[in-house]
Image: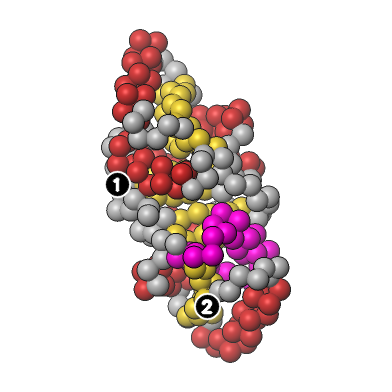
Amino acid sequence: MRILLPVDFSSNSRVAVYYALELFPQEENTFILFHCAKPETLEAEQKQFDEFIATLSTDKTFETLTSTGITAEEIKRCALKAQVDMVILGRKGKLNNTENVFGKTISALMGNIKTPLIVVPEAHRSTLPKKIIYASDLTNINEELKGIIRFAKHFDALIHIIHIVPEELEGETFDQEQRDLQMVTRNLYSKIKFTPFTSTGIIEGIDEFVKCEYPDLLAFYKHPGNLLQTLWDMALAEKVSMHNHLPVLLFRKEEYYI
């Protein structure tokens, strides 16, 4: 695998780098550190880049890329140019008044990057993903699961699919939905569990479910028209990922992950 690691020399960048190294320790994996610098400080920031690499507690060799421009756009451009399979980056652990929880750069990436993206919170303490919570509206579930299953197989992880349903849903419909999905998924991957979960709202339901199940990672699949579009706002980040300190894995319709 080829993995792009955007860094800004902060503590959250360091957490993301170590998380990536733990996820994919195999020798054949290639890690590319990327930094987007300001044109007027490019030389100074390149020196800082070298110092950041020197302080990493690993004997892993990194490829490096540096560019100037708008950070989110440059990450997307470099991901395509370097033909990476995944982008992993960190996010700040605190809010401020000028950006949402994920920050402007990460929010922009979530909107349209085609490469699978993992966002690692600064407060996360590295844990291999043995339980993955995957929230879905069940649209195109077979196609959606392809990438997540490939990812989960790396870690022999359980994929726990949750579908948030209205509290007024009839019990018979609830049970039929569970039977249907079990039929669909049983031949795809042995470690899949499905739970329809009643809640007054999608965000509230996922947050409540996470608190009960203690997953290691949250996975979402985004495509036009998906009801989960609403998840990519401040409420999801603040209520689900941030105070649970969980990494988030985002897939898009175009990608199925190698």
- On the picture, is 169 further left or further right than 249? left
Q: Residue 205: which disc?
A: none
Q: Is residue 238 visible?
A: no
- The local secondary structure at tag 1 comes to loop
Q: Earlier in the sequence, mark 2 or mark 1?
A: 2
The x and y percentages for residue 69 are 45, 78
The x and y percentages for residue 257 are 37, 53
Which residue type carries mark 2?
Thr
Nearer to us of marks 2 and 1 is 2
Q: Residue at x 65, y 64 (%)?
A: 14
Q: Residue at x 53, y 54 (%)?
A: 119
The Cα–Cα distance between marks 2 and 1, rounded to whole angstroms, is 34 Å
Disc 2 designates what residue?
A: 64
Q: Which of the colour schemes (rainbow, by chain, secondary structure, one colour) is used?
A: secondary structure
Q: Nearer the viewer, residue 144 or 205?
A: 144
Quarter of the image where one finds residue 112: bottom left
Quarter of the image where one finds residue 192: top left
Q: Magenta segment, which residues?
A: 2-29
Q: Is residue 182 visible?
A: yes
Disc 1 designates what residue?
A: 224
Which residue type carries mark 1?
Pro
Q: In this rendering, is residue 55 above or below 138?
A: below
Q: Residues within 10 Å of mark 1 (few under 14, many from 20)?
A: few
Q: Residue furthest front?
A: 27
Q: In this rendering, is residue 189 above or below 89?
A: above
Residue 13 in the magenta stretch? The answer is: yes
- The local secondary structure at tag 2 comes to strand
Q: Residue at x 64, y 85 (%)?
A: 47
- On the picture, is 224 further left or further right than 126? left
